[in-house]
Image: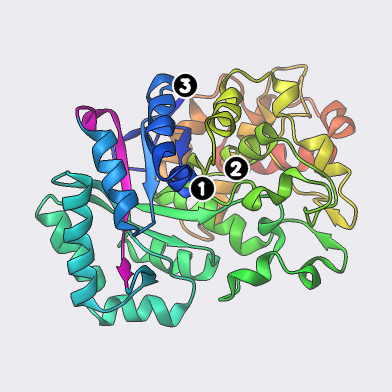
Amino acid sequence: MNYRELGSTGLKVSEIALGCEGMTEDNYAMCAKLFDLAEQSGINYFDLYASDPDLRSAIGKTLEGRRGKFIIQSHLCSVWKDGQYMRTRNLAEVREGFAEMLRLLRVSYVDVGMIHYCDALSDWDDIIRNGILDYARELKAAGKIHHIGLSSHNPQVAMKAVESGSIDVLMFSVNPCYDLQPASEDVESLWADESYAGHLTNMNPERQRLYETCQRLGVGITVMKCFGGGDLLSAEMSPAGVALTVSQCIAYALSRPGVSCVLCGAHSVEQLRECVAYESASESERDYAGAFASFPKISWEGHCMYCSHCLPCPVKIDIAAVTKFLNLAQAGGNESVPETVREHYRVLEHHAGECVKCGSCEKRCPFGVRIRENMTEAVKVFGM
């Protein structure tokens, strides 16, 4: 299992992580089975957005004796009321729900306290006005949560939270179809047929800017909806009209700037094994570029997807890495290049200044990226 830094939290998390969607299967017996496989596979991170007390109790039971082996991302504002899940912004309900969650999980703290499901700018204002953000800070000061997070599907809301400096972790929906769509307060629009009716070209710039800003500011991204609820794995169901594989979806999400792990919401042991198999998958099995280039009505023309089809470079430049650091440097606008970005670029074995402008990379790029121009710009930005 490969492990990544979770932003600036100091935590090292498995890049394949566990979602909670399938844990209720087989009258909650699936919970223990998934955690057993997770432990055997080196998965050390899981998300618990669900407020179902029976599920929380099942997780608490299966965590007994191995709390230290798992990093817990659990949600504030997700409560159980009148026998069903509810998202709340009532501070009293949030406090009661968090206390119940700790009790049922049989833990004294969670590693990431995720403010649950904020997709509207007005909702972010409510989180501040109603004292929920202050409560999260209170919990952090008391050691009951170690890091504050926010879950969202809206890049505008997420960006506001990230730039406020209030959160350490962002749980965000990342997949190649969502990434084409503009910001919306209605999560259903991300998958609506009409949203894909025309010809779509390139990633939505707000989403690209969000990922780059998270990496620049040290906010770790944990990915939800990597498979679009499974629809991306079916040619009939996917808005792209082409089926992707599990490994292709995971590889795409993990190649976005700022991303630390993909939360796989497996409904069976077999599904989780398929996700874990990504770790031993070949480069060709992970390769998503060919599939993306074949999407009808969808094009990433001129946009670097960090797929490395441009390689090999005759002077051994890691073109995708140079381009990613260039994009990160430019994401801050007129601000100076962050030291972390400059240092990561500096330690690359080869730099853009070594480019001989042969153009062989551009002939191989499935997306028509003007790589030689990027190399010239990188030299201007980094001086080498």
For residue 223, which numbered disc appears in the image? 1
Does the magenta run of residues contain 73? yes
Q: Residue at x 52, y 44 (%)?
A: 265
Residue 330 located left or right of residue 190: left
**Residue 254 figure quarter:** top right
- In the picture, the quarter occupied by the C terminus is top right
Q: Which residue ends up furthest to the front in the rendered image? A: 27
Along the polypeptide, which appears first: circle 1 or circle 2? 1
Closest to the observer: 337 or 367? 367
Q: Earlier in the sequence, mark 3 or mark 1?
A: 3
- Give how far apart the Cα atoms at labels 3 and 1 are: 17 Å
Disc 2: which residue: 253
The answer to whether residue 144 is visible is yes
Q: Is any atom of residue 215 visible in this view?
A: no
- The local secondary structure at tag 1 comes to strand
Residue 324 image offset from top left, x and y in percent: 60, 40
Q: In this view, does 178 lie to the left or right of 81?
A: right
How far across and down, in percent of the image, does residue 75 sit?
A: 32, 58
Q: How far apart are marks 1 and 2 (CA)?
A: 7 Å
The label shown at residue 374 is none
Query: How does the figure colour the protein chain or chains?
Result: rainbow
- Name the spot of residue 234 as percent of width and height, x first: 78, 46
Quote the CA–CA distance across marks 3 and 2. 16 Å
Q: Name the residue under label 3.
A: 1
- The crowd level at tag 2 (other Cα within 10 Å; few <14, some 14-19, many 20+) is many
Q: What residue type is labelled 1?
A: Val
Q: Which amino acid does label 2 sit on?
A: Ala
Residue 50 position in % (x across, y down): 38, 57
Residue stretch in magenta: 65-81
Kindly check if marks 1 and 2 are in contact, taking CB atoms under 8 A apart as contact: yes
